[in-house]
Image: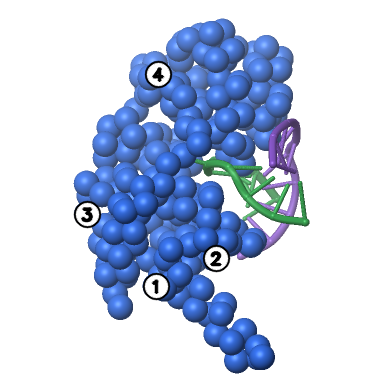
Chain colours: A blue, B green, C purple
Amino acid sequence: MTRKERYQQVLAYFQEHNPTAETELIYDSPYQLLVAVVLSAQCTDKRVNMTTPAIFAKYPDVQTLATATFDELFPLIRSISYPNNKTKHLIGMAHMLVNDFGGEIPMTVEELVKLPGVGRKTANVITSVIDEQPNMAVDTHVFRVAARLGLTRNATTPLAAEKQLVQYIPKEQIHIAHHWLILHGRYICLARSPKCGECGLRAICPYYKKKIKPLEKSGS
DNA sequence: ATCCCGAGGG
DNA sequence: CCCTCTGGAT
């Protein structure tokens, strides 16, 4: 079976079950989404949403964020993972946006990646969500789930996985496919102990087959 | 213990 | 390619 054929089966499954998120990042502008996504690394959306209102109230735009000092911003980020890095990143990001981008959020991956704290995954999220560009943000979930389902082959880096996925997923489906892969990874296809028993994709999942076959042979 | 929509540096 | 950053919920 080709990767694209696998993908079509996976998509059909998701269309039928339409997985939904318990929580999503809350934002009201490209600026707010950028801040929220930078904060979301190794942190639940729920917790990000608990901290962003205070940040957006105190720093409503890039210009005000660029005036923030570390000691002012840090307490607002303290309860999130990697508060030190994220505080530095947000301030550095705001500085570069003001100094090099006229205070506007650039809408290309190449430009966004130059910002401190913004890697390829974040840049892909921003450009796909805000500007509907056909970019696939490969985070740990997408990387893991796509590999297990056979949607990627021999992809050892997120970038390699991204290129494979974008190659055969129809542009208009990339955004929803990304979202569904995330949710599947978050609720079913967990990293350490995936809930294969609850997964309707077992029948077509190479990872499940590999996992089960040895058990059947050695089992009673 | 395991999991949360990673990025930067060595 | 590996390491570090590093808090809270379940």
User: In the rendering, at what x and y percent does residue A78 appear?
Assistant: 71, 24
> Residue at horizontal 61%, vertical 21%?
A51
A75, A196: nearer the viewer: A196
Q: Is residue A204 visible?
A: yes
Residues at discs 1 and 3 in contact (Cβ within 8 Å):
no
Secondary structure of residue under mark 2:
helix
Q: Residue A166 vs residue A194: left or right?
A: left
- Label 4 crowding class (10 Å Cα cut-off): few <14, some 14-19, many 20+? few
Residues at discs 3 and 2 in contact (Cβ within 8 Å):
no
User: Are callouts 4 and 3 both on one chain?
Assistant: yes
Tell me how far mark 1 sits from mark 2, CA to CA: 14 Å
Q: Which residue is mark 1?
A: A204
Secondary structure of residue under mark 4:
loop
Amino acid type shown at disc 3: Pro
Tell me how far mark 1 sits from mark 3, CA to CA: 21 Å
Q: Which one is in front in this view, the residue at disc 1 or the one at disc 3?
A: 1
Amino acid type shown at disc 1: Ile
Work out whether mark 1 precedes mark 2 in sequence or the reverse, and give the earlier one.
Answer: 2
Give the number of the disc on residue A170. 3
> Residue at horizontal 42%, vertical 41%?
A20
Q: Which one is in front in this view, the residue at disc 1 or the one at disc 2?
A: 2
Tell me how far mark 4 sits from mark 3, CA to CA: 28 Å
Which image quadrant for residue A146? bottom left
The chain letter under disc 2 is: A
The chain letter under disc 3 is: A
- Label 2 crowding class (10 Å Cα cut-off): few <14, some 14-19, many 20+? few
